[in-house]
Image (tube, grey):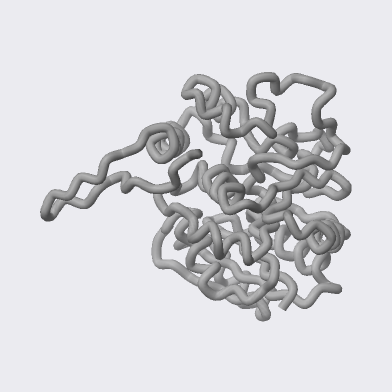
Amino acid sequence: MKLSVVIINYNTCDMLRLALNSVVRAAQDVINEILVVDNGSADRSLAMLKDEFPAVKVIANAKNEGIAKAYNQALKQVTGEYVLMVSADTITGKKTIEKALEFMDMHTDAGGLGVRMITPDGRFLKESKHGFTRPWAIFFKLTGLAKYFSKSRLTDMQRKDWVEEFQTSETDVLNGAFMLYRKEALDHAGPLDERFHIYGYDIDLSYRVRLTGFKNYYFPKTYIINFNTRGNAKFSYTYIREFYGAMIIFATKYLFKVPEIKMEGIPQLYPPSYEVK
């Protein structure tokens, strides 16, 4: 099997339909499998999948398990040489998968690859090339973690002479809307950290893939259209809790060396792991 495509869905039936149609078309010349993990959707997602995409493998959770945990469920079942993690609010370009796989085949040092992202109205998303939204960039600068993401130029993100929209480049982080990984790299990195419920899982995974010795690339010679449905409620309590909670988890993992504390009957919240060198 050349490619395994994994999509996580939670109450995005109409967007999921568009995402699947675009992926099926883009991967039609590649031996592939498509897995959808449904996180307890209350809409018609499961019925739609059964009626319109009978060939798609479906993992139906009774409740929302979070994106990282859902990806781990799928990764236990994938058989592809490459794994494409694509969000349900993304339309994949007709030649995107073909061109991305060609690049990965030619660059054996590549563990992961992201592509040029545009909005439905055609606006280029700068997160395509450096992987970070502005709040994450500020967070890494303030904590001092920016030094571990030198290829993202976090200390000077506005430099126009670094990576332009159409310039292929090595990067630190892949955006969660479209992450094409070599399965070998994922096996070395290990499962996604399930404490990252909605946000931060892509940054953490990208960083851990780099720690294994593989490289991540920004490949702009093809594109996806991203609707960014997760960014629509930025002033809600859920957003604040999940988004900034992910930052705290990341800082605790990599900024501090947490001592192992063993107390009977009390699990350790942040076990020590992934030392930064």
Residue at image x 50%, y 24%?
Answer: 144
Residue at image x 64%, y 58%?
Answer: 85
**In the figure, 26 relative to 87: above or below?**
below
**In the figure, 104 relative to 271: above or below?**
below
**Quarter residue 80 falls in:** bottom right
Q: Looking at the image, which is closer to me, 202 or 251?
A: 251
Q: From the top left corner, tell me how far across and down residue 63 is, in percent.
A: 40, 61
Q: From the top left corner, tell me how far across and down residue 120 is, in percent.
A: 78, 41
Quadrant where the N terminus lies?
bottom right
**Quarter residue 186 falls in:** bottom right
Which residue occupies the extreme front position in the image?
277
Q: From the top left corner, tell me how far across and down residue 88 is, in percent.
A: 64, 55
Q: Looking at the image, which is closer to me, 193 or 145?
A: 145
**In the figure, 191 relative to 270: above or below?**
below
Q: Is residue 180 left or right of residue 62?
A: right
Q: From the top left corner, tell me how far across and down residue 277 is, in percent.
A: 50, 39
Q: Is residue 175 visible?
A: yes
